Every structure is written in structure tokens, then in C-alpha cells.
Amino acid sequence: MILVTGGAGYIGSHCAMALIEKGYDVIVFDNLSTGHLKTLETLKNIARSNNFNFLKGDLLNTENLNKAFSSGNIEAVIHFAAFSQVGESVKDPAKYYRNNICGTLNLLDAMRKYNVDKIVFSSTAATYGEPVRIPIDETHPQNPINPYGFSKLAIEKIMDDFDRAYNIKSVRLRYFNVAGADSKSRLGEWHEPETHLIPNILKSTFANSKTFQMFGTDYDTKDGTCVRDYINIEDLVQAHLLSLEYLKKGGKTDFFNLGTKTGNTVKEVFTLCEKVTAKDISVETKPRREGDPAQLVADNTKAKQILGWRPEKTLEDSIKSAFQWEKKLQAQINS
Ligand SMILES: NC(=O)c1ccc[n+]([C@@H]2O[C@H](COP(=O)([O-])OP(=O)(O)OC[C@H]3O[C@@H](n4cnc5c(N)ncnc54)[C@H](O)[C@@H]3O)[C@@H](O)[C@H]2O)c1
């Protein structure tokens, strides 16, 4: 059985769905702080047999964790549960350090207690901070510039120590910008508030929506807007399944970038969104936001070589699936 923390959220739910479809027994552990019950209902409907369970619980509550681990034979953990809004982490770092670091420490302690020795962890490109070279490979210095990034880096360090001292093996996946939805529109991105570029552009195409705000048009990039590396959610999920297999085969603790090695500017993303939605999207340009580097692009060679991973979807695929999902979400909100 695989324990998926944060499985009611955006990325965790897509991963739980892929695990269920592969025939794994899955238990989702989530406190529903930013996740959704409706997402869990979808997962329940997808699970044909009895291979899906949900336990409402908080990583900060050790009794909840004991319940999760004692409920079945947990073979490995895939750990998505965290708070992940950069701006909020600057305003309220205590909330981020407590939930992300203390929560993960409790999880790792429960793994020790119940002899579970494999974990795949959602880390982030935010652990690198301001890039000193592009593309960013895994040897790039890690100097996060906000509490969110620092919380994830602290967890990476804790995981190294837990391997050395207690033999818990981890794979840390450093995501770049995750985008898109399930290609059958069963699940998709659902953050409140939404801080990510693509859903925000798409949301602005619906009636009564705000104008899309483009921050920073004077960067030293080809069209003056920031360059990011958009990795499709289904490709990202595949890397989790491969990481799980890697650990099951006795793989050592390691860390990998998940990105495409292709950068796209905000203007390029915007233009593709106009193409996919066939709408003229109204846009307002704003000054740069503090802490937004000009470029973030992953070197994904290591994940390709060691995990045998290949991102296959294009940015247009991600925008198309995100748009299909957004239509469904808007209909649900307005019904
Ligand atoms: N979305 C991205 O582009 C991106 C990029 C890099 C890294 N990440 C990381 O990926 C992971 C998933 O991100 P997401 O976009 O799916 O976020 P999300 O907010 O949609 O999902 C997080 C889930 O964790 C749950 N959760 C949070 N704290 C918890 C706690 N203490 N106990 C139990 N459950 C808890 C929430 O209820 C939610 O369901 C996070 O760790 C995030 O930092 C995301």
C-alpha cells in the first residue's frame, strides 16, 4: 500500500489516480486545508476495486499519523502535503515552517516507528533561489530566497540525515512550473486563491472575471517577460511512479529536477492561451514582482538518465487540458 499525503490537492490527486489505475493500493492522508472533498469523490469513483482509501488527518497530529500507518501495510510514502504559496510564506513564515518542516518530521518519525523506509518527496525549483546559470542542474547551489523554498530545502537536508542515521531512502523531485490537467478532465488544478500563471490567464476568459495581470515586462529576456519551464502534470506524475519503482529496486537516496529544459516567456504562454481558447484576453501590465527571477529552466538530464523519465507533452497540451478542466470547474462553481 502506498500512502499519499496531500492526495486531495492538485498534484497529489493526479498521482493517486495514476497509482490506482496501475493497481496499487492507495491511502490518501490529507487534512483538506487546501485540498477538496470533491477530488476524493472522483478518486473513489475511479478506483474500480477496493484499492483506494481516504483518511482525514493532519501531519501535525501524531495520533492521526499512527492511525494511517497502523491501518495497513504501507510500503512507501509519496509526500505532497505542504503549504506552497511563496508570497504567503513571506508574510507568515511560522505557518510554513510549522506545517512543512514539523509536519514532515512527524511523517518521517512515523515511518521510523512503522518501519517504512521509502519516500518520494515534492521538492521545488524554489530551493535553488536566484539562478547563477541556466539551465539549472542538480549541482546548482541551493540558496532559497523565501521561507517556502527554505522549508523545502530544510526537508531535503533532514531526509539526507534520516538516510544516514535510520536508512530511510528518499527521492526528492524538484518541480519547475507544473501545468495542465488530467487529459480526460477528471481532475485538474484547483487552488484557492490561484497563484499560477496558466489557470489565472484561463480564468480571465470567463464572464465576470478580472483582467489578467502580467507582472514585469522589462526583464532581460527575448520579449521582456519572465521565462519559466512548464512541466505537464501527467509527465510529472510519471516521474513519481518511476521514482517509486527506483526505490523499490533498492535505489539510493537521490534528487532530480523535473522540467522540460525548454523555457517559455509569460507572453508566449499568454499567446498560446489566446490560441487555445480562441479568445482575445484582456491584459494589464504591471511592474515586476519582488523575488521573481528573470529565468528558471531545468536541466532534466539526470532524471532521464537515472529514472528513465521522458517528458512527452507540450506546453500547448498542458494549456488545452487546463482549459478543458477550467470549463468544468467554472460550470461546477456556477451551478
Ligand atoms: N503546483 C506547483 O507548481 C508546485 C511546484 C513545486 C512544488 N510543488 C509542491 O507539490 C506539492 C503539491 O502541490 P499542489 O499544487 O498539489 O498543492 P495543493 O495545495 O493543491 O495540495 C496540497 C495538499 O496537502 C494537504 N495538506 C497541507 N498541509 C497538510 C497537513 N499538515 N496535513 C495533511 N494534509 C495537508 C492540503 O489539504 C492539500 O490537499 C506541495 O508540496 C508543493 O510544495 C508544487
Image (spheres, rainbow, N blue to C red):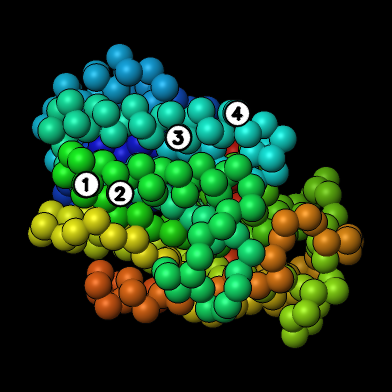
Identify the secondary structure beneath mark 1: helix
For the N terminus, the quadrant is top left
Q: Vertical placement of 86 versus 324: above or below?
A: above
Residue type pointed to by label 4:
Ala
Q: Mark 4 touching mark 3, by CB under 8 A?
A: no
Residue type pointed to by label 3:
Ile
Residue matched to label 2: 160
**Furthest residue toward bottom:** 222
Residues at marks 1 and 2, CA–CA distance in whole angstroms: 6 Å
Who comes first in sequence, dot 3 or dot 2? 3
Q: In which quarter of the image is residue 27?
A: top left
Residues at marks 4 and 1, CA–CA distance in whole angstroms: 28 Å
Residues at marks 3 and 1, CA–CA distance in whole angstroms: 19 Å
Who comes first in sequence, dot 4 or dot 2? 4
Residue at image position (83%, 49%) is 210
Residue matched to label 3: 101
Q: Mark 1 touching mark 2, by CB under 8 A?
A: yes
Residue type pointed to by label 2:
Asp
Residue at image position (34%, 61%) is 255
Who comes first in sequence, dot 4 or dot 3? 4
Residue matched to label 4: 94
Residue type pointed to by label 1:
Arg
Q: Mark 4 touching mark 1, by CB under 8 A?
A: no
